[in-house]
Image: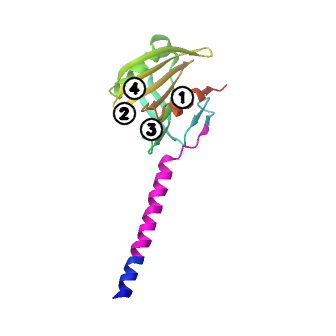
Amino acid sequence: MMGNLREWWSVIAVMTLVLIALVIAAFHHTSARPRWSPLVSAEGKFRIDFPGTPAMTRQDSPREGAGTVTLTTYELHLLPYRATYLVSYADYPQTMVEQRNLLDETCDLFNGEMGGTVVDKTDITVGDYHGRDMNFNGLPGRVRQRVLMVDRRIYMLMAYPVRTETQKDIDRFFTSFTLMP
């Protein structure tokens, strides 16, 4: 009987140590800061830092007055932080660029898709190009968005949710965006 009791306590002790190691490993994983790395898109003509490796998608989308526009998106979801970072771009026909305000249309489109209420909207200039910075409250929480018009191309950066613990990373993401020739 004594031997079985010792074996039983040994098994419990080992299981307890394994459980403690798993808890420490899980805590370390969720508290670790993301590894930042640059994404350089020669086709998109931009560079930006992501806190991980984003997935790239392309989607053809019919647009009134433009035919089909291809939207290229790089998107990263960080599960421990429940945060999303994305940059996308699309080229529009020159006639559409001249006839419509694509900056406001793009801001309104994504704001509407996320069920958003605009908190603030600011006109910006990056080099010779005009854009909008916007914060809105949407379904995922506070969302930060930047839309930039470069000739016939619209760039959009978005990160959410904006919280105290993600603000520094979101600022880094937005300030790292640079256009390439």
Disc 1 and disc 3 in contact, CB within 8 angstroms: no
Disc 4 and disc 3 in contact, CB within 8 angstroms: no
Going by the numbered disc 1, the residue's amino acid type is Asp
Picture residue at 46% right of the left edge, 25% below the top? 145
Q: Which mark is residue 118?
A: none
Picture residue at 46% right of the left edge, 11% below the top? 99
Front residue of 155/124: it is: 124
Going by the numbered disc 4, the residue's amino acid type is Phe
SS class, disc 3: strand
Residue wearing tag 4: 110
User: Disc 4 or disc 1, which is closer to the eye?
Assistant: 1
Please rate how many residues cluster around mark 1, counting C-alpha atoms within 10 Å: few if below 14, some from 14 to 19, many from 20.
Answer: few
Q: In the displayed structure, would residue 108 be above or below residue 166?
A: above
User: Disc 2 or disc 4, which is closer to the eye?
Assistant: 2
- Farthest top residue? 99
For the residues labelled 2 and 1, the Cα–Cα distance comes to: 18 Å
Please rate how many residues cluster around mark 3, counting C-alpha atoms within 10 Å: few if below 14, some from 14 to 19, many from 20.
Answer: some
In which quadrant of the rendered image does the C terminus lie?
A: top right
Residue wearing tag 3: 83
For the residues labelled 4 and 1, the Cα–Cα distance comes to: 20 Å
> Which range is magenta?
11-38
Going by the numbered disc 3, the residue's amino acid type is Ala
SS class, disc 4: helix
Q: Which mark is residue 171?
A: 1
